[in-house]
Amino acid sequence: MQLSKLENQVYEELRKNNLLIFKIKDLCLLLNFSRIKVYNIIKSMKKKKIIKKAGKNFFAFNDVNDFVIAQRLSYPSYISFWSALNYYGFSDQTPRKIFIATAKYTKEMNNFKYVFLSRNKFFGYKQIGEIVIAEKEKALIDSLLFPKYSGGIKEIIKSVLAALNELDIKKLLNYGLKINNKAVLRRMGFILENAGINKNILNKIKLHIGKGYELLDPSLKREGYINKKWMLYINC
């Protein structure tokens, strides 16, 4: 669809300044336009599907990947949990929301679900193009920490089995130890044992699982049977 002279000016300035995600005030400062003038231009460009709403007070070009938008709205952050499992092909289920790990408390907006991680748990990510995403091993560790953001433990088990040939098991173990959460280690040990992983790895995990019992899936009731080796209620 053809752009007006003003719309084309806005388009060119945004692209030139790499403002793929922006606020109305950004354009006011960039072009020295009034707020009303910018608002009307944006409204017209939205109708022409050049620009889209991207969270409260934010806009983005229509062709900007939602993963990029999600992480730009909360810094620092990276794509993880179910979204990362699906991205890597470990889960064949496409979640309706995009799940993002963030070191900054951020409210859910649009279809973006932000999950706060403390600084000591905020690691294990990389950049692929414009997207910052969890490494394969960290996506699984994050999922074991908060199973409800990855479709539940059954979906995580399916993902681990699908990922086995692509995982660096030593890195998975190191990330599990680094995150310093007994429930994560227990869930990881239980799943890896059932996947037939080397006993030496399982024994290393076993040394760090502590005392007391945890739920295999914390989103479900405390029922089912007890696995004494991994100190888990197998409730799914």
Image (spheres, rainbow, N blue to C red):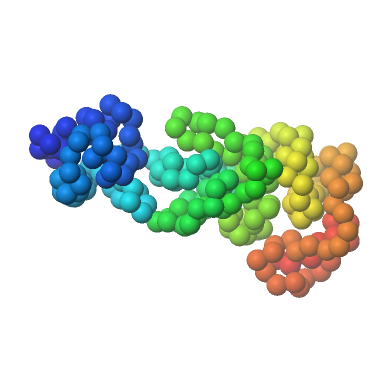
Viewer-nearest residue: 210 or 63: 210
- Residue plotted at (73% across, 40% down): 175
Q: Position of residue 61 (x, y in %)?
A: 29, 40
How many numbered marks appear? Answer: 0
- Residue plotted at (33% across, 36% down): 20
**Quadrant including the N terminus:** top left
Left or right: 169 with respect to 105? right
Q: Position of residue 37 (x, y in %)?
A: 15, 45
Compared with residue 201, is residue 220 higher up or lower down, i.e. above or below? below
Viewer-nearest residue: 161 or 53: 53
Q: Position of residue 235 (x, y in %)?
A: 74, 67
- Residue plotted at (69% across, 64% down): 218
Residue 169 in view here: no
Compared with residue 93, is residue 166 higher up or lower down, i.e. above or below? above
Q: Position of residue 152 (x, y in %)?
A: 62, 59
Viewer-nearest residue: 118 or 115: 118
**Quadrant including the C terminus:** bottom right
Left or right: 163 with respect to 57? right
